[in-house]
Amino acid sequence: MSVLVVGSIALDTVKTPVAEKADLLGGSASYAAVAASFFSSVNLVGVVGEDFPAEHVEFFGSKGVNLDGLEQVEGKTFRWSGEYLQDMNTRETRNLELNVFEHFEPKLPPHYRTSPITLLANIAPSLQSHVLDQSDSSGFVIADTMDLWISIAREDLLALCKRLDLLILNDGEARLLTGKDNLIVAGREILTYGPKYVIIKKGEHGSMLFGDEHFFICGAYPIDSLLDPTGAGDCYVGALAGYLSAHGGEVTTAGLRKAIAYGAVVASYNVEDFSLERLRSLQRSDIDERYNHLISISQIDLS
Ligand code: AMP
């Protein structure tokens, strides 16, 4: 079974308190697709320009990512530049160049249209909806978003919410979307916008799953070697989607809990290096090791 991943493919410049690196492989779909590939086959949809290095395309291929939906067109690849403050939690976007993304209309090859799991990684909500318009799947649809779209494309995002099984966003975005400071209130309110489930991520403090009759809290995997937080959220949702796809696409709350823990684990590896570097050498056995550890440090002995 394959997971469909649509989102941005970027060349990023990232500055952290320890280093600045330019022209790195980035983008929501890049992180999400590679994270998902540890669990499931992946069908990627995205656009890059003529300047996109062939080695990155080869890297996607080496992870078994199907690239029939990757367009390479005239012009420059989408570029994003961000800077992290000392605490590595606060990020400022320094520059954003849409380039080939400006006229991008995601096109689903026919064999991508019936995915049991669709992951709409972070892009404009109108483009995310455009993907759903082409998909004849009755599968499980997940969308990620960001503060930018909540601010400038709120109506599009609210329209998308009605078509979603799961919306995932971070704490600041949940507050921005709902106007509620309390995250429990915010999570419950977002459920009324349409999605069956909502996940609110809280960075190093883990994440919360909300469903009509369901609530779950998962810690973040504790690490002491954070180098670059970029893509943590995309890896989280990519691994989550990949895990659900590998388990038949039939989504249960028990399955979602496991998928969330796998998301936390893959995100924890990704932030140990810049760009997708840590994912290059990562093995499924490494992921399972941290997954088992995360479970063991989260359990309470009831005896
Ligand atoms: P994350 O750290 O999980 O929020 O994801 C960071 C990635 O999102 C970077 O690699 C950027 O290239 C990408 N990104 C930043 N802004 C946007 C945007 N407006 N639309 C799509 N992708 C973006």
Image (cartoon, rainbow, N blue to C red):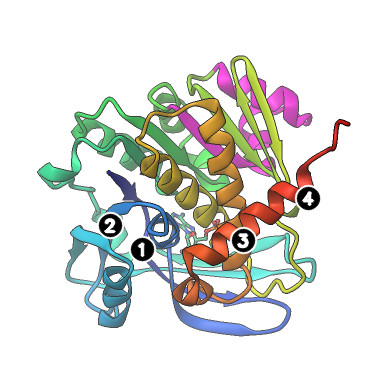
Image spot of residue 235 (x, y percent): 51, 56
Between the C-alphas of marks 3 and 1, the distance is 29 Å
Circle 1: residue type:
Ile
Q: Secondary structure at mark 4?
A: helix
Q: Main secondary structure of the magenta part?
A: helix
Which residues are the magenta region? 165-192
181 above or below 79?
Answer: above
Query: In the drawing, does residue 240 fall left or right of residue 128?
Result: right
| Mark before the other along the chain sequence, 3 or 4 | 3
Between the C-alphas of marks 4 and 1, the distance is 35 Å
For image coordinates 17% across by 71% down, the residue present is: 74
Image spot of residue 179 (x, y percent): 69, 28
| Mark before the other along the chain sequence, 3 or 2 | 2
Viewer-side residue, 277 vs 124: 277
Query: In the drawing, does residue 274 fall left or right of residue 55?
Result: right
**Which quadrant of the view contains residue 163?**
top left
Q: Which residue is mark 4?
A: 297
As for residue 188 lying within the magenta part, the answer is: yes
Q: Which residue is mark 2?
A: 46
Q: Which residue is mark 1?
A: 9
